[in-house]
Amino acid sequence: MFLKDSSIMDEMINALTKGIGVEQYKPIRISYNVLKDILFKDPKFNNCTDDIKQFLVDVLALSIFHQHVIIPFHGASNFISGAREYGAEKVKMAGYVLDRDFYDEADKITKSFFVITKKYGLPIEKLHVSSVNTFIEDWLKIVKDYGS
């Protein structure tokens, strides 16, 4: 059932990318699909129960979203905040104007993400995917420790 119903399996990435423009959507989906394919070939992943597999796929989606959206927004938010200390009200970067509206939106998105990760006890430092194998090992240990 798990591998056959990709609409359920991809629910998290679909929710995270719903309504964002193709400029942001495409690299997120490409990264997600590449890493998901590697994940599905890993024996440790394949030895998991369906609910743990789903959890790992969901955390992978959160990880990709964190990398492509949260880190850049958080950095831009900090940059704008620093620039304001020197009197800049808006910053133009690569054709984009980073003004109060952008700052407010970036701040809202990053804070919401951090509230979710905190609420569910998801360590931010484990969202970085240096290798799929390490990612699986780290999260299986977290699940095991949480369940103990």
Image: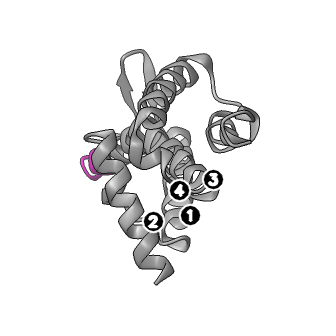
Q: Which of marks 3 and 4 is nearer the N terminus?
A: 3
Q: Residue 50 carries which label?
A: 3
Amino acid of disc 3: Asp
- Give the x, y percent position of residue 87: 30, 45
Q: Name the residue under label 4.
A: 113
Q: Nearer the viewer, residue 59 or 119?
A: 59
SS of the residue under disc 3:
helix
Q: Quadrant of residue 55?
A: bottom right
Q: Earlier in the sequence, mark 2 or mark 1?
A: 1
- Give the x, y percent position of residue 44: 40, 49
**Magenta region:** 81-86
Q: Distance between the residues labelled 1 and 4?
A: 5 Å
Q: How far apart are marks 2 and 4 (CA)?
A: 11 Å
Q: How far apart are marks 3 and 1 (CA)?
A: 23 Å
Left or right of 51? Residue 86 is left
Residue depicted at 43% across the width and 32% down the height: 41
Q: Mark 1 points at which residue?
A: 116
Mark 3 near mark 2, Cβ–Cβ under 8 Å? no
- Give the x, y percent position of residue 38: 41, 30
Mark 2 near mark 4, Cβ–Cβ under 8 Å? no
SS of the residue under disc 4:
helix
Amino acid of disc 2: Leu
Vertical side of 133 occupied by 118: above or below: below
Q: Is residue 142 found inside the magenta-colored segment of the image? A: no
**Mark 3, other Cα within 10 Å: few <14 / some 14–19 / many ≥20:** some
Q: Earlier in the sequence, mark 3 or mark 1?
A: 3
SS of the residue under disc 1:
helix
Q: How far apart are marks 3 and 2 (CA)?
A: 20 Å
Q: Mark 2 points at which residue?
A: 122
